[in-house]
Image (cartoon, rainbow, N blue to C red):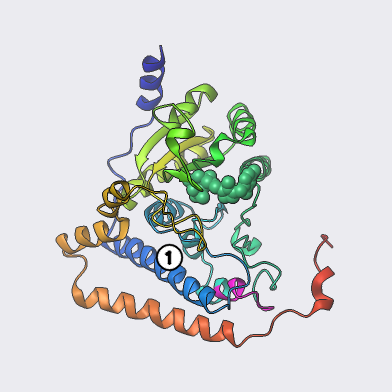
Amino acid sequence: MKNKTTKKISKTYLIKKNNHISSNMKLQFYYHMQLMRKFEETVFKLYRQGKVVGGAYSSEGNEATAIGSAFALEKNDYLFPMHRDIGAHFVKGQSVKNLMLNYLGKSQSPARGHDGTGHYADMKLKIFGNISPLGAMIPLANGVALASKMKKEKSVVLNYIGDGGSSIGDFHEALVMASVMKLPLILIIENNQYAYSTHISKQFIVEKLSDRAIGYGINGITIDGTDVELVYKTTKDAVENARKGNGPTLIESVTMRMQGHAIHDDASYVPKKLMDYWKKKDPIVVYEKKLFAEKILSDKKKNEILSEIQRQLDEASDVALNSPFPVWEDANEKVFAE
Ligand SMILES: Cc1ncc(C[n+]2csc(CCOP(=O)(O)OP(=O)(O)O)c2C)c(N)n1
Ligand SMILES: [Mg+2]
């Protein structure tokens, strides 16, 4: 019975072969994955210098998932990123300078220096800030999806959740509502093998987390989350489906958290063999090789891209380091809607 149902659902969900990706777009994927990694490396350096006021998380291993999926959105769509999706902010139009100001807790940042741990929102760009209690974002993403549907905006909502977070009650409740109301929601489970130090073998016994979609009667698919083009195409299909009014999709994107949970965690509990296996699947290294083989990337082009990223990071760090912190009188401002 289970197999039959799985077959039925995956049949309605074939990735379209005509989802063409131009050379220019491939270079954009590469640029953004590199930017995401280099940005976080810079944040880690600044953290060690005592300049970052909150936490520092690494998304190493998650670049293809965050970037490929965010590229499937249009300007009027909504993004609900998690703590491993900093690159999705950039794809949605956020500037390197603004996010650096945020991390350093400075007053001119979009968060006005009131947050330094990645809960960064920007309503103009339709980016909703990450919420710390795991799972709590999904019902909110539902709310925005419902509002958008009622306003006939034809926008979709993209939200992420970790493997750990997908066991929270909110996940179930939100998907029940999203499926019954046919909300334009795309939920990506970033299965990066660990939730803090807990391996997935201690978290669930289903073969694929996307099988849970069957219980809600919605489309579900599990993909290689280290393949940026596959993530893009899969998400694009789900986006088109949602835009047509066909309701939500659950995507399990399988990847690896290549560093500890955050900067304070050395991940010494991760077996070396497992880490070595995933190192060979590094999304950026693998994609770089592919683009070289397709003659889309050359040494010259690669150097140009990396220099441009470094230039932006140096400039953003400089501005952020030399900007003022918020004043205490500002603490009560903009707490409530005016
Ligand atoms: C409801 C809730 N419980 C516990 C935490 C503490 N916490 C923050 S991140 C995290 C691990 C999350 O793992 P996962 O969902 O797999 O995401 P990952 O960090 O691996 O990307 C935990 C336990 C929290 N923020 N919210
Ligand atoms: Mg995880």
As drawn, the residue found furthest toward the top would be 1
Q: Is residue 270 left or right of residue 189?
A: left
Name the residue nearer the viewer: 153 or 136: 136
Q: Is residue 160 visible?
A: no
In the rendered image, the vertical position of residue 122 relative to residue 158, given as above or below: below
The x and y percentages for residue 228 are: 34, 52
Say if the magenta span includes residue 42.
no
Q: Which residues are magenta?
A: 100-108
Question: Compared with residue 211, is residue 307 higher up or lower down, i.e. above or below?
Answer: below
Q: Mark 1 sits on what residue?
A: 36
**Residue lying at 68% horizontally and 85% vertically, measured from the top left:** 324
- Say which amino acid is labelled 1: Met
Image point (35%, 25%), residue name: 11
Membership of 105 in magenta stretch: yes
The location of residue 163, given as percent across then percent down, is 49, 40
- Above-or-below relation of 157 to 338: above
Residue 174, by quadrant, is top right
